[in-house]
Image: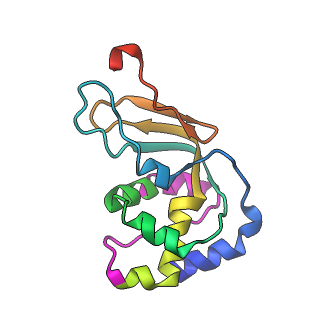
């Protein structure tokens, strides 16, 4: 599956488009609902409307460093949540294993797949939903709007 993801990414480079602003799954992994009274505002549920693939330069050391900061379960959950919309747009979404072993961080195919998931899959339009309060945060033109209303602060 990892080799398939790498081969797919190479084959469909022509279908990738450049986007200055885009919510990556790496970004999603860092966002939390800070609404007043919310104790469990992470991870936000993704309700995608438009998902795109935008190729970025593969940097294995960056991927390894960012892996250390990731909430793996939240990354896998976010990936699952965008899978159907991405597939409808003919974007292949690779599977990620339930857990990562240390030897996987030395596997080029795994690192390329992780890079694709973290950096190249973008939610251009959609909504992020707080798991506790149900508060919705819009994603427009790739930018998540996490601003709260006065009564939510």
Residue depicted at 51% across the width and 68% down the height: 62
6 w.r.t. 88: above or below: below
Pinpoint residue 103: horizontal percent, then vertical percent.
37, 85
Q: What percent of the width, then of the height, locates residue 97?
A: 37, 73
- Residues drawn in magenta: 80-102
Left or right: residue 102 versus residue 127 is: left
Residue found at the very far right of the displayed protein: 14
Between residue 145 and residue 125, name the one nearer to us: 145
Instruction: Examine the rendered structure and indicate whether residue 141 appears above or below residue 58.
Output: above
Q: Residue furthest top?
A: 151
**Which quarter shows the C terminus?**
top left
- The answer to whether residue 93 is visible is no
What residue sits 28% from the left and 24% below the top?
A: 36
Residue 115 appears at what percent x and percent y? 53, 68
Scheme by which the image is coloured = rainbow
- Vertical relation: 65 (above or below) 39: below
The structure residue drawn at horizontal position 68% and vertical position 75%, both measured from the top left corner, is 10
Q: Does 83 appear in magenta? A: yes
Measuring from the top left, give residue 67's x and y in whole percent: 41, 66
Vertical placement of residue 122 versus 142, above or below: below
Q: Residue at x 45, y 48 (%)?
A: 28
22 falls in the magenta region:
no
Q: How many marks?
A: 0
User: Is 7 left, or right, of 148 in this rendering?
Assistant: right
- The answer to whether any part of residue 46 appears in the image is yes
């Amino acid at each position: 599956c990892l080799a398939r993801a790498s081969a797919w990414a190479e084959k469909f480079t022509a279908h990738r488009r450049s986007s200055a602003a885009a919510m990556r799954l790496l970004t999603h992994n860092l966002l939390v609902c800070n609404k007043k009274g919310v104790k469990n505002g992470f991870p936000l549920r993704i309700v995608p409307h438009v998902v795109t693939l935008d190729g970025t330069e593969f940097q294995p050391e960056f991927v390894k460093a960012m892996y250390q900061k990731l909430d793996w379960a939240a990354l896998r959950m976010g990936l699952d949540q965008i899978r159907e919309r991405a597939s409808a747009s003919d974007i292949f979404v690779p599977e990620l294993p339930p857990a990562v072993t240390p030897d996987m961080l030395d596997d080029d195919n795994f690192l390329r797949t992780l890079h694709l998931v973290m950096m190249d899959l973008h939610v251009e339009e959609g909504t992020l939903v707080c798991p506790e309060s149900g508060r919705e945060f819009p994603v427009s033109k790739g930018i998540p709007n996490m601003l709260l209303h006065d009564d939510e602060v």
